[in-house]
Amino acid sequence: MKLNNKVAFITGGTSGIGLETAKLFQAEGAHVVLVGSNADRLAAAGKELNGKALLVRADIRKAADIERAVEQTRAKHGHIDVVFANAGGTTVAPLEAVTEEYVAENLAVNFTGTFFTIQKTAPLLAKGGSIIVTTSFLNTIGYPGLSILAATKAATRSLVRTLGAELAPRGIRVNAVSPGAISTPFYSKIGLSDAVLSEVASSITQKIGLKRFGEPLELAKSVLFLASDDSSYTTGAELVVDAGLTQF
Ligand SMILES: NC(=O)c1ccc[n+]([C@@H]2O[C@H](COP(=O)([O-])OP(=O)(O)OC[C@H]3O[C@@H](n4cnc5c(N)ncnc54)[C@H](OP(=O)(O)O)[C@@H]3O)[C@@H](O)[C@H]2O)c1
């Protein structure tokens, strides 16, 4: 087992990539701490983890919530080995529709939440610890209607370098995983009708080298690589898992 008895703190663990990663981590021997903002989704995810995960309700937009989640983790486990800062989301907004509130909300969920997840968990990590941040294919290619999400994801890519450099002296690695188009509930939340969504999906599929969306498990396996000692000489990097979407 690659994560035997390791404590893994996962945000955005109630759905999609985060939930699939939590299941894989558990199968690899980890004690999972699952963070989510919605009580019902948190409880449902807890059942999928056989009632063995520590479930913590926290809104990633609030640093105080993250601090409380970390304190509950410290109380139960004493330390953290792996952090998967993965929570995120958005709605589509073309240039003319973007408001100050929209920018603030996107920053809070996708950037500030990621930053404070790392800041608050870092004191509980020891030498050999691993932090993984979920970025996006949008941090390298332009896609209409997602300017602010793309910018927040580029900012988190930058964080991985700077915080990787800050934490390297303590033997803690910081890396990013960059998903391409993955089949998760993400797309049902972005505010597009089913008809438009289906057009968008086929247009993206045409641009993907392997001509299909990825499955959450295909992402989870890459996160496991970055979480485990298999990637012991990798830090500050971004592992692109997008079937060629940003490469061809
Ligand atoms: N799917 C893709 O194609 C794709 C592509 C590139 C990047 N990504 C990135 O991958 C990550 C995971 O997305 P996904 O595709 O797995 O989507 P998802 O199924 O919608 O999962 C998003 C997760 O983020 C959590 N979250 C959202 N707002 C939160 C908040 N304020 N506080 C705490 N948790 C919050 C959600 O939990 P709640 O239950 O609390 O809402 C949920 O667990 C995101 O960062 C996303 O940007 C996805």
Image (cartoon, grey):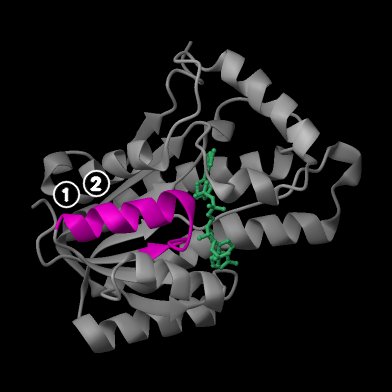
Judge whether residue 110 can be spotted in this image: yes
Local secondary structure at mark 1? loop
Q: Residue at x 44, y 17 (%)?
A: 244
Amino acid type, mark 2: Leu
Magenta region: 10-28
> Which one is in front, 35 or 132?
35
Above or below, 93 relative to 137? below
Q: Is residue 163 magenta?
A: no
Q: In the shown orientation, is residue 95 left or right of residue 138?
A: right
Prevailing secondary structure class for the magenta stretch in the rendered image: helix
Q: Give how far across and how far down residue 42 sits, in percent.
A: 47, 72
Does the closest atom of ligand 1 sit within 8 Å of the Cβ of label 1? no
Q: Give how far across and how far down residue 206 sits, in percent.
A: 60, 14
The answer to which image quadrant residue 23 occupies is bottom left
Amino acid type, mark 1: Ser
Instruction: From the image, tell me which residue sits under label 2.
Output: 224
Check whether the beta carbons of the residues at disc 1 and disc 2 lie within 8 A of each other: yes
Local secondary structure at mark 2? helix
Q: Is residue 22 magenta?
A: yes
Tell which quarter ligand 1 is in. bottom right
Instruction: From the image, tell me which residue sits under label 1.
Output: 228
Above or below, 166 relative to 70? above
